[in-house]
Image (tube, rainbow, N blue to C red):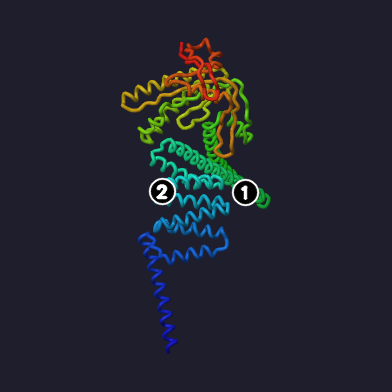
Amino acid sequence: MVASNLGYLKVFFIQINQLLRSCLLLFVVLFGVVPPISSQDISKVQEQIQGIASPELQQKKCYEQAVFLRQSDPQLAMLFARKAIELALFNKNKTQEAQSCWIGGELAEQLSKLPEAVRLFTQSRAAASISNLPEIQLKAVTKLETIAVAQGNYKSAYEWSLEKNTLLRNRDNAAVQAQNVETADEKNALLEKIRQHDQYLWMAFAAFCLFALLLYQSRQRNGKRIRGEMAEKNALIEEKRRRSEHLLLNILPRAVAAELSVRNKVAARRYEKATVMFIDFVSFTQIAEQLSPEDLVASLDICFSSFDDIIGRNKIEKIKTVGDAYICASGLSDRNEHPADMIKAALQIQVFLQKLQEKHRAEGKPAFEARIGIHFGAVVAGVVGTKKFAYDIWGDTVNLAARMEQSCEPGHVNVSGMARSLVIDEFDWTFRGKIAAKNKGELDMFYVHLK
């Protein structure tokens, strides 16, 4: 009798336990909130983790606990996240490191520990780049941009936004390539279908001579339909190819883009008669503090787009922008080896900026002024890297052009003696004397003016 009663009590407690679990699940589903976890449960989880022999499984368990607790107990979740990062580093597993640093960064941001959040998102970005996790890399860069804006560090925010845009373009390029592969597979499948269909028609022709005419007419109709479908798909492939080529030409010079498309790599080349121009805005940081991020980026876009238009008309190749600095060169693949076009472009840019300053000051807005430096000499140009590659130039000519810009006064164009000697009769010059340049000694410098 006692044993029977104990059996009933055991069944009763099992049913009560199942009912409590069902109520807990219903609470989570209805309110989207994880109930507080007791210290006993936490200790049990920690004991379970310590009892796992494999560091890989320990890391996975810590990461899962950090994700599970991030809403209900961020402080505890942060402890698990840090342990997960430590184990990922011990395992030398970049994928685990990227994931763990990402959740750790989110928790640090949630706990208002922004320096730690920046460090963890930066570490997540680096690990994701190595382990080829573009989505985590993009999310980390987006978070770093958001935190930089919140901290008022607009220069860093702008640099992060450039990297974010590059990642987005890479993602779009990957999607286009995947679509191209899918389209090619569809085309091959369609061609295979045509081949099999033709074989069937010829077999049917041999077996059923009486129906030859009807089968021929059917084949003609099907062929016309298939050719129409192929024409549409070919047009779609061609359109995607043109878009990809246009995107490549926005990144690289035309000759370099053509070489990259054919050989899948670009050989470095030395150009003996290159002219390099550096443009840098004066007091950019102070002006940036007076503008919202949107207005700052819009102002830079107006200036850089106008610079692009001016140098394009003068057969000059844009190299890159670094923050508020703009670098371009001539005498490269287009063999525009005379510095006159570069000097004309520099003077046109200063005229454009002066007009823009007048407009902004009339509207009560801060205005950009620029220093411009130009030097002539030999450079080496090429494409570096296999991911997010960029066309760049190197050499002492580049350094001297930068020194010309640094030694220039706002609103002027500072030209080296070497560049001036080649176009001395085409412009008016103001000799500034020998001016000390960083790590270069004293150099002849000239301000240039239109005749």
Mark linked to residue 197: 1
Q: Find the residue positioned furthest to the right.
A: 206
Regarding mark 1 in the picture, which secondary structure is present there?
A: helix
Disc 1 residue type (three-letter): His
Indicate the position of residue 354 as horizontal and vertical percent values: 39, 21
Q: Is residue 28 visible?
A: no
**Lateral position of residue 366 relative to residue 235, left or right:** left
Q: Is 152 situated above or below 275?
A: below
Instruction: Calculate the distance from the C-alpha at mark 2 to the C-alpha at mark 1.
Output: 67 Å
Whether residue 55 is situated above or below residue 186 in the rendered picture: below
Quarter holding the N terminus?
bottom left
Q: Position of residue 193 (x, y in %)?
A: 61, 48
* Pick the front one: 304 or 86: 86
What crowding class fits label 2: few (fewer than 14 Cα within 10 Å), some (14-19), or many (20 or more)?
Answer: few
Tell me if label 2 and label 1 are in contact, CB under 8 Å: no
Q: Residue at x 58, y 31 (%)?
A: 257
Residue 113 disc label:
2
Residue at 51% over, 16% down? 434
Amino acid type indicated by mark 2: Lys
Name the element at disc 2.
Answer: loop
Give the answer, above or below, for where 116 lies relative to 323.
below
Residue in the picture at 47% in, 19% down:
413
In the rendered image, is residue 19 in sight?
A: yes
Question: Horizontal and vertical percent for residue 437?
Answer: 52, 22
Numbered disc in front, either 2 or 1: 2
State whether residue 389 is above or below residue 271: below
Q: Quadrant of residue 187?
A: top right
Residue 26 in percent (x, y) is at 38, 65
Compare marks 2 and 1 and give the one earlier in the sequence. Answer: 2
Q: Specify few, some or many for label 1: CA neighbours under 10 Å numbering under 14, 14-19, or 20 or more.
A: some
Question: How many dots with numbers?
Answer: 2
